[in-house]
């Protein structure tokens, strides 16, 4: 139950930065979701400074594994309104400040 | 007419003679021919009249005219032919002369119109003029496209004069072949097809044209949905916080569950403890009350037990008697037989009873282990129902609350009489791996093992003697010896040889040498075995002719032992001798034999017909000092007995089988 670190004082432990991947919204199958999650983690860690490359890596890997026309967005701040084929969306957070959205639409 | 013609032809012949002869011949011939229709046979001419038939209207011609010779000439000109035939032409409205056929006057019988027409005919010319030749010329351009302009000019020029055009085209062809020279393409000579418009047919066949259809399906497009969201640092952070909080909450939720369970258990068990304590107190109170009642009821028996003196003994020198004291009965086990019993070595008033069944054709489904005290004959102090009839038991001398039992189904168990009844047995042999495959006939506690665990031995009908080490939580089995028999192996169904084990029926340990024990078998053998040899017997004696039921070592002389058997005999043996020292015939199968704990010469045996025999070899080597029918022989039989230890008067206890009554027969007065 971390509070905002605004308290300043001795509450150093309160400012907890969570970095684990966290699914915000997904209707993928269990297997696919796990795959997507692992891919995102790998890509974001590999290209920590370059979201574009990370997104490209995730997209290409997903295309190979689950068929073409995946779309991936990696970024820290964006909004989106998308149409996706059912059971192919995964919107997740990673690293505490990155949002990754993966969906398929062909 | 022929005559006239001949006459005309030979008109100018001077040779009249020849003429005449010719005419004669012709005449004759004519006559023959005219008659030939009617009469076939020439030989019959003469029968016919020679008169010539004349038609009535025949013109009379004078003889002179007839005689006149008319000359006739054969020419190639057809006199019938009309040289100018005229027909009316409707189109022109006048008569015109028909075209003269060149071949003469011919009448077509069959007309077949060919598909080709003459090249120089009008129709052909018309067709050529109409451009039909293009079809033929089309073939060319691919071969020699460079010629086309020339050809076009030619065509234009030659349309009027087909002949010339054809010739020119042929000439062109030659040129073309010359121009292309050795070119790969061989140009065929041009063939102009001139088709008959009215009866024209190509070689190619036209097939039926199927009507075209278009069939297409369309799949339902995969379902789609819309989703929209906004990723902002604040949103991401909040969601992480939320998720983390949820996780923490779940963790906290899980912990209390376990704790709650524990606490509830504790609470319950506290309640239980209270209940149990209360129940225990009540039970104790009731036990005391029961004891009080029983003490009053059985006071005279207790007095007899302690102080009874049979006045008739004075008149029976060397004889004694047995006095029945208590009768123990356990109602649930009414249909069971007492298969074994033993005094508790520590608590002098307590003894254990094994309820099983010896009626093997009608075996009971369960058994019972009971502890009775002589202070309360009405009800056992401890009783526990077992899954299988109990055949034998033994009380551990060091910790007298541990009782090992052998069951009918081959299992052995250890019961702890201190535990409450719910816990049932404390140890039980593994039903699959270790247990005996036959009835366990006798169990005996042995010495402690090297590492301090208690152990007991069991002997079973499957011919094995097994040592059971009482490990914490389990029994560990070790096969000490497998009893072999003298029988040769029997060939099994699939060719293997099945070795036959002899069936062990009793076991007895040497009082001093812990590794020596005696084994009695169902074929009457008594084997002396050692724990150190698991293959061979130390000694082997053919003791009886029937199963050996019990063997008992003398308490004072360790080399003397007694055995009893189904062959009605009790034998006294000494170690190392093949022949028994004494042999007593008791007239019925002997179920048990025991040396008295207080004397080296006194032993007792019980038989299946309900009698107890007591011998004192010091008094009488041949006859018992006491024979007493304890139970009626018809319905019951004695199976086991045991001496009560360390009581001055001895105490013998017979038990009866078939009904679950145990009678404490006691107060055997010894007359020395």
Image: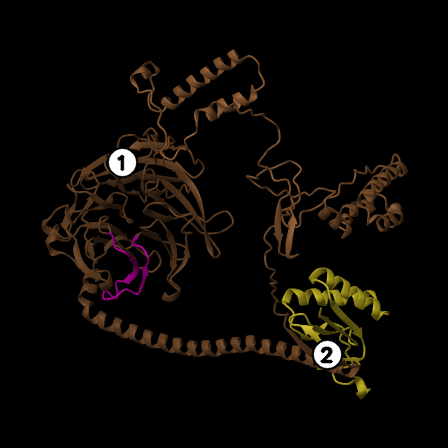
Chain colours: A yellow, B brown
Numbered badge on residue B102: none
Task: Name which quarter of the figure residue B49 lies in.
Answer: top left
Work out whether A64 lies above or below B187. Answer: below
Residue that badge 1 annotates: B524
The answer to whether residue A1 is visible is yes
Task: Please give left or right for residue A31 compared with residue B524 in the image.
Answer: right
The answer to whether residue B515 is visible is no
Task: Please give left or right for residue B458 compared with residue B251 in the image.
Answer: left
Q: CA–CA distance between discs 1 and 2?
A: 86 Å
Q: How far from the left and from the top, in percent, is residue B555? A: 32, 45
Upstream in sequence: badge 1 or badge 2? 2
Is B372 in the magenta? yes
Q: How far from the left and from the top, in percent, is residue B354? A: 29, 55
Frontmost of labels 1 and 2 is 2
Neighbour class for label 2 at 10 Å: few (<14), some, many (≥20)? many
Q: Magenta span covers which residues?
A: B363-390
């Amino acid at each position: 139950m971390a509070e905002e670190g605004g308290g300043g004082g001795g509450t150093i432990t309160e400012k907890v930065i969570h970095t684990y991947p966290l699914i915000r919204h997904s209707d993928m199958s269990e297997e696919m979701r796990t795959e997507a999650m692992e891919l995102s983690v790998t890509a974001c860690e590999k290209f920590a400074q370059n979201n574009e490359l990370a997104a490209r890596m995730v997209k290409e890997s997903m295309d190979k594994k689950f068929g073409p026309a995946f779309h991936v967005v990696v970024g820290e701040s964006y909004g989106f309104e998308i149409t996706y084929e059912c059971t192919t969306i995964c919107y997740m957070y990673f690293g505490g400040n990155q949002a990754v959205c993966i969906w398929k639409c062909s | 007419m022929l005559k006239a013609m001949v006459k005309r032809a030979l008109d100018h012949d001077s040779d009249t003679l020849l003429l005449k002869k010719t005419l004669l011949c012709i005449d004759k011939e004519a006559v023959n021919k005219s008659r030939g229709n009617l009469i076939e046979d020439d030989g019959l001419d003469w029968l016919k009249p020679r008169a010539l038939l004349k038609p009535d209207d025949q013109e009379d011609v004078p003889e002179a005219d007839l005689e006149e010779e008319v000359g006739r000439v054969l020419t190639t000109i057809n006199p019938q032919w009309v040289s100018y035939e005229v027909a009316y032409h409707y189109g022109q409205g006048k008569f015109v002369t028909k075209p003269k056929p060149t071949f003469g006057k011919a009448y077509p019988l069959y007309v077949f119109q060919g598909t080709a027409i003459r090249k120089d005919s009008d129709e052909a010319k018309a067709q050529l003029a109409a451009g039909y030749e293009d079809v033929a010329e089309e073939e060319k351009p691919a071969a020699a496209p460079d010629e086309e302009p020339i050809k076009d000019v030619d065509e234009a020029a030659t349309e009027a004069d087909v002949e010339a055009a054809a010739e020119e085209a042929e000439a062109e062809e030659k040129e073309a072949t010359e121009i292309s020279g050795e070119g790969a393409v061989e140009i065929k000579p041009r063939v102009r097809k001139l088709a008959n418009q009215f009866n024209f047919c190509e070689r190619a066949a036209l097939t039926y044209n199927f009507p075209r259809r278009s069939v297409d399906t369309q799949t339902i497009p995969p379902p789609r949905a819309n989703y929209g969201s906004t990723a902002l640092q604040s949103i991401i952070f909040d969601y992480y916080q939320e998720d983390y909080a949820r996780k923490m909450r779940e963790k906290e939720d899980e912990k209390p569950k376990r704790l709650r369970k524990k606490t509830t258990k504790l609470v319950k068990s506290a309640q239980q403890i209270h209940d149990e304590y209360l129940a225990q107190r009540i039970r104790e109170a009731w036990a005391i009350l029961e004891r009080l009642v029983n003490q009053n009821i059985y006071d005279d028996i207790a007095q007899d037990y302690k102080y009874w003196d049979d006045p008739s003994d004075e008149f029976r020198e060397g004889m004694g008697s047995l006095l029945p004291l208590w009768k123990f009965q356990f109602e649930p086990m009414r249909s069971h037989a007492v298969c074994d019993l033993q005094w508790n070595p520590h608590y002098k008033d307590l003894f254990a009873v094994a309820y099983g069944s010896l009626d093997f054709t009608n075996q009971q489904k369960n058994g019972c282990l009971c502890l009775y005290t002589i202070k309360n004959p009405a009800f056992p102090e401890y009783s526990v129902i077992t899954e299988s009839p109990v055949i034998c038991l033994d009380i551990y001398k060091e910790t007298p609350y541990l009782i090992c039992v052998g069951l009918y189904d081959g299992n052995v168990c250890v019961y702890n009489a201190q535990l409450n009844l719910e816990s049932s047995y404390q140890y039980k042999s593994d039903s699959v791996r270790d247990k005996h495959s036959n009835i366990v006939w006798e169990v005996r506690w042995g010495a402690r093992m090297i590492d301090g665990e208690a152990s007991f031995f069991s002997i079973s009908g499957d011919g094995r003697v097994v040592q059971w080490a009482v490990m914490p939580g389990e029994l560990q089995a070790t096969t000490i010896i497998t009893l072999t028999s003298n029988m040769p192996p029997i060939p099994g169904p699939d060719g293997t040889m099945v070795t036959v084990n002899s069936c062990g029926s009793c076991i007895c340990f040497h009082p001093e040498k812990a590794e020596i024990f005696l084994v009695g078998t169902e074929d009457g053998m008594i084997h002396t075995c050692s724990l150190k040899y698991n293959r061979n017997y130390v000694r082997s004696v053919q003791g009886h002719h029937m199963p050996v039921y019990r063997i008992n070592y003398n308490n004072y002389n360790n080399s003397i032992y007694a055995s009893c058997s189904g062959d009605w005999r009790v034998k006294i043996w000494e170690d190392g001798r093949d022949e028994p020292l004494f042999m007593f015939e008791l007239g019925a199968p002997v179920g048990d034999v025991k040396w008295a704990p207080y004397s080296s010469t006194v032993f007792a045996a019980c038989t299946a017909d309900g009698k107890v025999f007591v011998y004192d070899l010091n008094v009488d080597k041949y006859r018992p000092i006491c024979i007493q029918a304890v139970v009626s022989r018809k319905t019951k039989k004695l199976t086991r007995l045991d001496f009560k230890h360390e009581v001055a008067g001895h105490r013998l206890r017979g038990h009866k089988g078939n009904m679950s009554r145990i009678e404490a027969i006691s107060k055997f007065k010894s007359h020395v």
